[in-house]
Amino acid sequence: MKGKFKNSLKCKLNISKLSVLVYWLIFLLLACLFFTNDFGLVDIHKTSIITAVAIDTEEGEVLVTAEIAVPQPSQSGENIVYTQVQGSGLTIADALNEINAKTGFYPKLQFCKLILIGESCRDKQLFRVLGCFYRKNYSELTALVAMCEGNAYDMLAQKSNVSDMTSEAIRKVLSDEIEKSANATTSNLKSIAAMEFSHSRACYMPYVEVNNQGESQLGGNGDNVGGEGENNGSQGGSGGGSQSGQGGEGGQSGQSQQGGGQSGQSQQGGEGPVEFTARKTAYFSDGRFIGVLDDRQAFALAVLENDIRLAVLPCDADGVHYTLGLKGVKCDADLKVKDGVPQLKISFKANARIQGARVKVDLQKIISDDVVSASVLDGAKAEMRARFEGLINVVRETNSDLIGVRELLYKKNYKYFEAFQNDVLQRMTVAYDIKIDSVS
């Protein structure tokens, strides 16, 4: 018995020593990997870190402008300088290879956060322009995508008073906070592909505009918005003053031509810092550019597609212009087929509070602004309906399914899909259920 016990003890000790040896071997192997391998980390001395890309077309070639972060030594630590380098070729990969030849750095797009598409790409198939970015290990699918007025390389060369990095200043007007206030409809590579290759085969992206410092566009409800004078709208944009019933015209013909004209004035008008806005939305169908939604139509689309935290809605009531803050916003679109007719229902619900009124302030009455009168609520409902109608007009006239009607038809009314998929946007009737209540 004692012999067996000794043998068992020796065996356990041998196993214990062997396990310790194995652990040490694993530790040494990991240490070797740690000190000899960069695990794919970027060597900034060999690689140019591209933070944004601007895409234009010129004489049948793709012109790519890369915003590159160049680390610089400084007494207080690392300092980064941002510069733009251009390359051209038949594909984006050719253009990036030329950037490599010009800089001596191999361009990587893993850090690219913004892809800016210029007006010259409007007549190109969207996924021929963006196709390179979807290839494996080429770039992150979370990169924001936006179209801009004028040339994308001109916009990327602008200086902003918000940030030293132009692309960061543009991304600020495409942030989550802006999206949750319905002032922009942001899109990235992933969401654009998901929309385009759905049954609706339509997608959209923010339309970025540039304003000289101190200039602004009207914000949403015609020429009554803004200051106290009669000439406030003299420098305003076309989106704010459009009528709700002209959604298709404002979203297509007028908007699609304005970018080139404004671009030369705003981008070459001065050397000082500029301001960016993205209150309008460019939209595509089957990968083809169709037009630009004005800010009222884009607001309706944002409310339908995004989770809104606080939206600002201008409206008129009793001859007075009001600005309302909308909280608890819930909006949904539903499609049913009844008696062979597709019926789209848009439901909207929100709580309103007066944030401003174009009247002389009465300090004794301002405390009761939380109680919004019935006439002001009716004005807000009418304004929301007008914005939805403007968006629906664009959808019908251009046959661009921005709001996903065909996808609803496929998912919820599949037996009618084959029969209605081609003309459901023209056949459908539209009903609105808009409820706006006072906060208190």
Image (cartoon, rainbow, N blue to C red):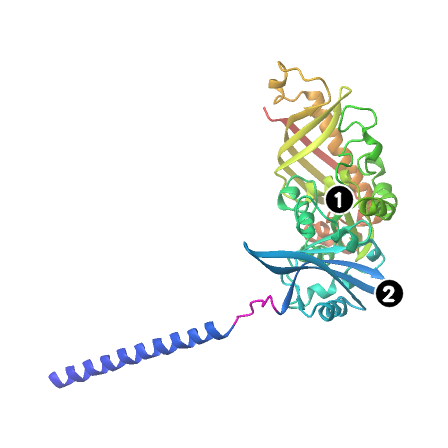
Q: Tell me the quadrant of the picture where the C terminus can be found.
A: top right
Q: Position of residue 130 (x, y in %)?
A: 74, 61
- Residue 272: numbered disc: 1
Identified at 77% across, 51% down, the residue is 155
Whether residue 121 is visible, yes or no, is: yes
- Residue 306 picture quarter: top right
Q: Is 174 left or right of 395, judged from the image as shown?
A: left
Front residue (pair 188, 168): 168
Vertical arrangement, residue 336 with respect to residue 224, above or below:
below
Whether residue 1 is visible, yes or no, is: no
Q: Which stretch did the figure color magenta?
A: 38-45
Q: Residues within 10 Å of mark 1 (few under 14, many from 20)?
A: few
Residue 317 included in the magenta stretch of the image: no
Q: Is 389 left or right of 109, judged from the image as shown?
A: right
Q: In terms of secondary structure, where does tag 2 sit?
A: loop
Residue wearing tag 2: 60
- Residue 75: numbered disc: none
Query: Contact, CB < 8 Å: mark 2 with mark 1?
Result: no
Q: Position of residue 180 (x, y in %)?
A: 64, 41
- In the picture as drawn, the residue positioned furthest to the front comes out as 75
Q: Position of residue 58 (x, y in %)?
A: 85, 61
